[in-house]
Amino acid sequence: MKHRFLKHSLLLLTFVITPSALLADRVEQVSSPNGNLTVTAGTDDSGHPYYKLSRGGQEIITRSALGYLLTESINDFLDNDFDVSFSNISEKDETWHQPWGEEDAVRNHYKELTMHLQRRGGLRIKLDVVFRVFDNGFGFRYVIPKQDCLRSNNKDITLVISDEKTEFNFKGDLQAWTIPYDTKAYEREWGKGPLSGKKWECTPMTIEANPNLYMMLHEANLTDYSPLCINNQGFWDDIAHFKVQLVGWERADIPNYQKNHLVYTDYYPFYSPWRMLAVETTPGGLITNRVMLNLNDPCKIEDTSWLKTGKYVGIWWTLHLNDFSWSETDKPHGATNNNTRHYIDFASEHGFEGVLVEGWNKGWNGMQPVVNDLSMTESTPDYDFRGLQKYAHDNGTSIIVHNETGGYSKRYENQMEKAFSLYQSVGANVIKTGYVGDFLNTGGVDDWQQLPHSQYGVRHFRKVIEEAAKHHLMVINHEPVMPTGLQRTYPNLLSGEGVKGQEWNAWSTGSSPSHTVTIPFTRGLAGPMDFTPSIFKFLEVNGDSRPHTTLAKQLAEFVCFYTPWQMAADKIENYQNNPRVFTFLENIPSNWEKTIVPDAKIGEYIVTARQARGTNNWYIGGMTDANARTINLRLDFLKPGKKYTAVVYEDGDNADYKENPYPVNIYKKGVNNNSVLPIKMACGGGFAIQIVENYDVEAAALSWERVNGGRDIKDGDGVRFKMAVLNTGDTDIPVGEVISAHVLVDGVAPFATVVYKGGLKRGQSVVLETRQPWTATTGAHTLTATIGYGFRLPGDDNASNNSRTKKINVKPSGEEGGDYIPVRGGYDLYIRKVSIDEQSVPVNGMVKFVAEVVNAGDQPAPINNDALLGLGFRIDGKYANSDLAMWSDHFRRELQPGETVKVYVTGSINQ
């Protein structure tokens, strides 16, 4: 499948402002397509380039400087003495599609102004500034064209940027959320305060100007450059003055190193990253703003068919709780064959696409890898790398391969080709990289160390992404550089960490309740983040450490924090012990058609609603800070004229995050696009809602079979269960939508769960089989199969078609018996034998099938003209509607206990 990043519509208009016209006033303006935003740019009398931004005639950013300071080969100030040679204005309107994302279609509509500058004296260096103005934001970048003054001895010279002069001067002392520039791996809570009190800060910076104006300052398309930081230059004349402050090379394998060397380039034209500002009227608008994505280059991966989304569990939380160790020398080791198979079995049963395994490879010492022993290809003796990958694939899931580098970036680069080739050869498709440590180690003569948020770090992370793409590997990047929308260009870059995530709740005092309702509007605006949500058991997780949320809020995190590969981070035992709440995580997908934020206030609460891709179904998450609150959730985003079922998981009575976090009230209600749901959130709490079209799925049949074949069950036998699931509703269930079926033995919490995502048309059925065998014990047992909670009509919880019960008698291991086991308490139809009247049949010849059916129960089978015994004969296991023939015959009277009947069918084989 080729990628679908094709233009639906394209409008391109170009206007040229002549040199003579522009030199008269040296100022140009360009407005957004709807006229909402206007950029004014030009040069003053001294040739200083500048820009400013207004909305509806009111300045948002006042006059702010542009330019560079160069050193080394060319010592020059590219921030003054400029003339505007000429300018171009153009317009573009296109729609492109994401292989994964918070929505499918993204409109890219902007007007562009390119201002061509040239120094009046000296080398007369040319510098272009390109502005793109959208209806809800703008961006600009520098372009240094190819030119003779930047060549020496027929080669492009190396340009050294020692300072970027770009300013962002905001009108008013506005409230903003930031973290300091030197925050390790961006892992801390974001602080709110006036712009005048900010210092040297990372971006994104989120700004609340007034109830009708919210902004986010960041960058886009960070390529071979230092990541953006901003430094407060002071507050005067009611203007908050900020300037770009880049992080330089700490030490570098280049001649004449100086610490103020920020960016190097020796190729032209040279493009800086885009400096961008999202401008919205609501906080939620910032989350759905796509200016940053649109400023990135289109997808460079030609064939995107191998890109998938998914959910995963893993050997991870147990490591942070010190239940297990990353290192094989520190027992008990977490990444063992048995432990990994345990997680694979769980993922397979519950429809999770992946299992993360940390600590599988050689070179770990406690939580840290040892540089000289670190291997990305050699596994520990108790971990069968190839065998476990095969076991995972055989069971319908995959292993996410962990690559913790410890910051030894050069050593990792030296192993990438060999490691990535190995991963591809065994069918792995996702890797998780990590860079625990303060620096990236370049592996040079002096063991030089660079900051991750530097030009060196940007180069390294890009190398990993590009090399991974060659081997069809998707990347979850921990300890990253702050994301800037690169997933549009390289959609194998799934997500980054770069956030104070769940792990801090395992070994620190944890994060405040307000943290989780702040990061969707700060770190989350930079791109997908791997927060690792949904811990189910957390009171005193590790001493005084714990998540400061309710259980319902943990479900909401799965919706509100976006990443295309979302982790259910807890121990799987805690999910098994709470199956009804876990049903929400089973059902929720990880790829979306559309995202909206119906209600939010930064740092206080948020409600996020996402439409599952390719369906009319929605998933909603809501979270609050330490204050309890009630909201009235309008469902006007649902499709008009359709009836839906809402399954609500909200904080239970008396729930609160401090003392009583676990109560969850689960209920179901019929809804449509006119419905309003009153939802309560406890202090530190939240809610999650699954809204599906009115499906009705029936548990049509239940059977069992020994692992090695046959139904004669004895003590100690491994037994697998099969359940036929029928769509009895009037709506097709789309591919990707989860149907979960649970099998209980003697009423105990589900022995096994089967998850099906293949779609089910009206009247169509499918047979689901449990993967994990039940070990039979002597005596009578009651089997119950039930359909997952979301797929019942309102008020239909106890309807007979939601579940099916049968009894099974298990003989002692030494007892011999017939070919079937009599069942007590009902009827049970068992096919004893199937035969054919010819050993070979010519093409188009007639063939007679014979099936011998017995009622193995102790009650008559209620068969009559309204309820027929139907038999289907399939050839080579193929289903109906294939090229092979299928016949059926029906029996129309009661079948008594122990009675046997033969059913005959004659037909032709067209092969």
Image (spheres, rainbow, N blue to C red):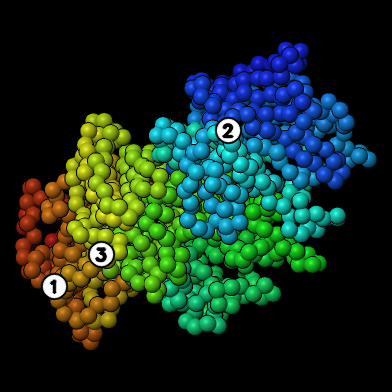
* Residue 44 spot, x, y in % from top left: 72, 24
Question: How packed is label 3: few (under 14 Cα within 10 Å), some, or many (20 or more)?
Answer: some
Residue type beneath disc 1? Pro
Q: Which mark is residue 237?
A: 2
* Residue 265 spot, x, y in % from top left: 78, 44
Q: Quadrant of residue 573?
A: bottom left
Q: Foreground: 570 or 539? A: 539
Residue pictured at 77% horizontal, 26% vertical = 46
- First-in-chain label (3 vs 1): 3
Helix or strand or loop: what does disc 2 sit on? loop
Residue, disc 1: 822
Residue type beneath disc 3? Asn
Helix or strand or loop: what does disc 1 sit on? loop
Look at the image and tell me whether residue 694 can be seen.
no
Disc 1 and disc 2: Cα gap in Å?
91 Å
Residue pictured at 67% horizontal, 37% vertical = 166
* Left/right of residue 397 with respect to residue 857 in the rendered view: right
Instruction: Decide: is 226 above or below 859.
Output: above
Residue, disc 3: 660
Residue pictured at 47% horizontal, 82% vertical = 332
Q: From the viewer's perspective, is the residue at label 3 or at label 2 nearer?
A: 2
